[in-house]
């Protein structure tokens, strides 16, 4: 039996005892006054029957409380209608659950004079940080809550001390057994029980509805993938002394978000101990000029519209002049470039020429179709809308093709890139586990042929371009590096947004399961592990490779003999990486 039920029942029994005592004295007064005994005894008999019935009712309530389960008992006491279903990952591993917590009350009126001093001393010993509050309670004459976060174990220990005047009332709280893991993805709840962020807010109605039937809500998250992603992103962010970092893993066929990391992170059980910046979902809210990883999208559009092809050539020997502006490459070419050269060398000149050939009308049409002119399509409420150019001039069009002039969230990039890599279907990013049979939502925006070509280009880039440090032998990894200068107050600074967009496996049917791994670091400072270089090739690409190596077994991606893989990919010599921004 819970303590509060025992206390309420005990007080009920005391009430009955008081009434019986009064009835006994009524008998005495009746006899003493020589009143009509029969009439007095009849009235007293009726009163005793009523009091006996009340006594039985109180006993029944106590028995029902002691026999019912914890959740039923809690609801009966507090009347809270805000029960929430458990959240579990795609494999049934627990992420969030309701538990009983307790408010602890102290009432000096229930203590003798001697007890007051002893109880006060004991509470100061147990709660040294609450000394002022304890002094205030004992200087008054009322029942006051001392602590609102006592768990069952602490409650039992406090009860064992036998402190008079100390009582407990249960209330429902949300518990996150894994603390920091998946914090931005899972989200928080408010004190009253409603969802406040992440999946807790996005799936509020479903979580409440399924609590009635004691059914858990299953997320798309794979806890093993989430853990590996967070571990690698966190380690690299700390090593690089980055301001923020993001990681996203999606199944591009289904749109499921299997993992989403936002660093710095926070403990879901102690959110008040962290800053707004630490609680922020940087994958959904932060907007970046993402740099050359955007070439996956712009070159994909070029192929889809016929503005470029694998047989096309581009002159990168001189900067591209647009009015008073010169667009140049980080590593100037001394010959004509093929489309493959443009991609694996990450040529801003070649990519700009492709965008100009597509034209502003067609290019912005595809940007719109790929969801880049709105916030990412997901159940989550956090995704922010993009920051777009005021006017689509030749300059802004060319800049957008290599990841400048518009700022988007990592989630928006993942959604758009997924359409390029899954056979051409724009699918919402979902935090719900796909049931495996329902028709997948989506709109065709590109052809399967474009997907096949882009997968091959991304694989080539990992084999012999800027992405070699992401290669994992046998897993057919493709990818694209990105290093964007970070704008502050309208001017580009020396800070970088260093990123890598990986896809694996690049072989097989275009409509098969395939996984995007996106990692981004805001303002890395360089470290010995990256040869003090801050670019995406050195900061982000190795992280993506480590993540892929760890998660591939969980996703059922098997290694195959890969004669093109470089077993010493992490020891490759320093090579130029693309840097966007700061054009002449």
Image (cartoon, grey):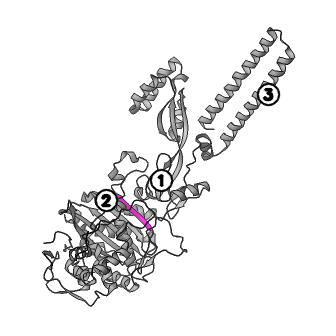
Q: Residue furthest right?
A: 38
Mark 1 highlights which residue?
195
Q: Position of residue 508 (x, y in %)?
A: 42, 83
Left or right of residue 35, residue 190 in this image: left
First of labels 1, 3 by sequence position: 3
Q: Quadrant of residue 210?
A: bottom right
Look at discs 1 and 2 and give the one toward the viewer: 1
Q: Which residues are magenta?
A: 255-267
Label number found at residue 14: none
Q: Nearer the viewer, mark 2 or mark 3?
A: 3
Q: Position of residue 571 (x, y in %)?
A: 24, 72
Helix or strand or loop: what does disc 1 sit on? loop
Residue 526 is at least partly visible in this image: no
Q: Please tell me which residue lies in front, 548 or 510.
A: 510
Indicate yes or no whether the magenta region holds residue 491.
no
The local crowd at label 2, few if under 14, some if 14 to 19, many if 20 or more residues have their Cα within 10 Å, is: few
- Percent position (x, y) of residue 287? 30, 63
- How many residues crowd mark 3 within 10 Å: few (<14), some (14–19), many (20+)? few
Give the labeled residue for mark 3: 49
537 shown above or below 165: below
The residue drawn where x is 50% and y is 38% is 154
Q: Is residue 36 visible?
A: yes
- Element type at mark 2: helix
N-term mark: 1 or 2 = 1
Report the Cα–Cα distance between label 2 and label 3.
73 Å
The residue that label 2 is drawn on is 235
Q: Quadrant of residue 483?
A: bottom left
Q: Marks 1 and 3, Cα distance to the nearest angstrom?
A: 50 Å
């Amino acid at each position: 039996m819970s303590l509060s039920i025992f206390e309420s029942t005990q007080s009920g029994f005391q009430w009955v005892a008081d009434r019986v005592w009064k009835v006994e004295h009524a008998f005495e007064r009746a006899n003493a006054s020589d009143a009509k005994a029969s009439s007095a005894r009849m009235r007293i008999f009726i009163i005793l029957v009523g009091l006996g019935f009340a006594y039985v009712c109180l006993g029944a309530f106590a028995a029902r409380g002691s026999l019912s389960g914890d959740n039923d008992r809690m609801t009966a006491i507090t009347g809270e209608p805000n029960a929430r279903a458990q959240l579990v990952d795609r494999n049934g591993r627990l992420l969030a659950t309701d538990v009983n917590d307790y408010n602890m009350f102290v009432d000096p009126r229930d203590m003798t004079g001697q007890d007051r001093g002893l109880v006060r001393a004991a509470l100061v010993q147990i709660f040294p940080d609450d000394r002022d509050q304890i002094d205030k309670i004992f200087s008054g004459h009322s029942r006051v809550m001392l602590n609102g976060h006592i768990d069952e174990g602490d409650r039992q220990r406090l009860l064992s001390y036998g402190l008079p005047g100390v009582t407990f009332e249960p209330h429902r709280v949300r518990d996150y057994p894994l603390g920091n893991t998946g914090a931005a993805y899972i989200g928080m709840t408010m004190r009253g029980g409603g969802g406040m962020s992440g999946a807790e807010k996005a799936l509020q109605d479903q979580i409440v509805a399924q609590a009635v039937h004691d059914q858990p809500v299953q997320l798309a998250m794979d806890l093993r993938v989430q853990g590996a992603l967070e571990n690698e992103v966190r380690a690299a962010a700390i090593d690089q002394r980055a301001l923020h970092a993001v990681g996203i893993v999606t199944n591009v066929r289904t749109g499921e978000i299997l993992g989403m990391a936002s660093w710095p992170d926070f403990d879901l059980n102690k959110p008040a101990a962290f800053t707004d910046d630490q609680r922020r979902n940087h994958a959904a809210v932060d907007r970046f000029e993402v740099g050359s990883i955007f070439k996956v999208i712009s070159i994909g559009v070029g192929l889809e519209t016929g503005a470029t092809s694998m047989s096309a050539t581009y002159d990168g020997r001189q900067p591209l002049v647009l009015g008073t502006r010169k667009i140049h490459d980080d590593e100037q070419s001394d010959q004509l470039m093929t489309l493959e050269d443009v991609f694996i060398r990450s040529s801003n000149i070649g990519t700009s020429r492709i965008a100009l050939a597509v034209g502003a009308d067609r290019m912005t049409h595809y940007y719109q179709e790929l969801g880049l002119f709105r916030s990412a399509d997901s159940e989550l409420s956090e995704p922010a809308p993009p920051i777009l150019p005021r006017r689509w001039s030749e300059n802004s069009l060319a800049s957008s093709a290599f990841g400048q002039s518009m700022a988007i969230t990592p989630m928006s990039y993942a959604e758009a890139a997924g359409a390029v890599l899954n056979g051409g279907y724009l699918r919402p990013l979902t935090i719900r586990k796909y049931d495996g049979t329902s028709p997948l939502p989506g709109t065709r925006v590109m052809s399967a042929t474009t997907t096949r070509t882009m997968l091959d280009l991304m694989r080539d880039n990992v084999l012999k371009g800027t992405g070699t440090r992401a290669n994992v032998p046998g897993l057919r990894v493709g990818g694209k590096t990105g290093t964007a200068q970070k704008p502050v107050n309208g001017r580009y600074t020396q800070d970088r947004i260093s990123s890598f967009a990986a896809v694996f496996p690049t072989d097989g049917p275009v409509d098969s399961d395939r996984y995007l791994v996106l990692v981004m670091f805001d303002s890395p400072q360089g470290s010995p592990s990256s040869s003090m270089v801050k670019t995406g090739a050195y900061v982000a690409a190795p992280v993506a490779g480590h993540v892929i190596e760890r998660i591939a077994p969980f996703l059922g991606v098997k290694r195959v003999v890969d004669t093109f893989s470089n077993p010493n990919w992490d020891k490759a010599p320093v090579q130029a990486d693309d840097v966007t921004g700061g054009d002449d």
